[in-house]
Every structure is written in C-alpha cells, then in structure tokens.
Image (spheres, grey):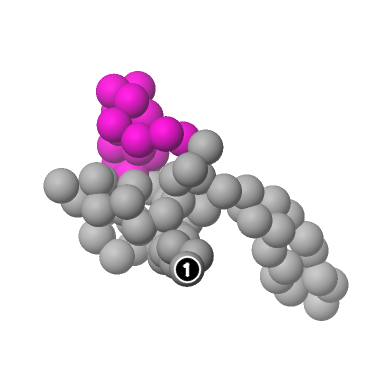
Amino acid sequence: MKRETFWTTQKTMANLFSVSKSTISEHLKNIFDDVEFDKNSTVRKIRTVQTEGGREVKRKTTFYNLDAMISVIG
C-alpha cells in the first residue's frame, strides 16, 4: 500500500495559520537545518498551471508534505 500524504505550499500554510509567508519560510528552514526531516521526502517540485492575463503559465512550485506542515505549527 502506497503511503498517501497532503501537499501544500508556503503561501497556503501562511494563509491557514494567519502568518506571513516569511514566517513559514523561517520555520521550514529551521526544521531542515535541524535535520528534523529529510528534505528529499518532505519537499516536492510540482508543475502548476495558472491563467495570467488570458494565457496559461506553467511553473514548478515547491510543495511541502503534511509532516513538514505539522512541524511548522508544532
């Protein structure tokens, strides 16, 4: 059975916890600096598509899994 998880961006975490994106970024940096989690298993670059000015723009966006998100609030 494949382990499923929830993935989110720093912007979404900031909105969820009513803090700035820079606050989330600082917490994540501390988590990875302390080697609390393996960055390779908790961070993914996922291609996203959004409409900007009537055109579709594709970008690779950094997403963090549920373990990283829980550590930010912990």
Left or right of 62? Residue 54 is right
Magenta stretch holds residue 38: yes
* Element type where label 1 sits in the image: loop
Residue farthest to the bottom?
Answer: 54
Residue 28 is inside the magenta segment:
yes
> Which picture quadrant has residue 5?
bottom left
Kindly give the residue lying farthest to the right in the view shown: 55
Residue most toward the left?
74
**Label 1, on which residue?**
1
Residue at 44% x, 63% y is 3
Which residue lies at the image location 45% right of the left edge and 45% below the top edge? Answer: 42
Read off the magenta span.
23-39
- The crowd level at tag 1 (other Cα within 10 Å; few <14, some 14-19, many 20+) is few
Of the pair 63 and 2, the residue shown nearer to us? 2
Question: Which sits in the foreground, 40 or 1?
Answer: 1
Judge from the rendering whether residue 56 lies leftward or rightward of residue 68; answer left or right: right
Q: How many marks?
A: 1
Q: Position of residue 44 (x, y in %)?
A: 57, 48
What residue is shown at x 48% (from left), y 43% (from top)? 41
The answer, for residue 53, to whether it is visible in the render is: no
| Residue nearest the viewer, comparing 18 with 59 | 59
The residue shown at (33%, 25%) is 35
Tell me if 37 is positioned left or right of 41 in this view.
left
Residue 64 spot, x, y in % from top left:
45, 51
In the picture shown, does residue 47 fall above or below 37?
A: below
Q: Let me know if residue 8 appears in the view.
A: yes
As shown in the figure, which amino acid type bears the numbered disc 1? Met
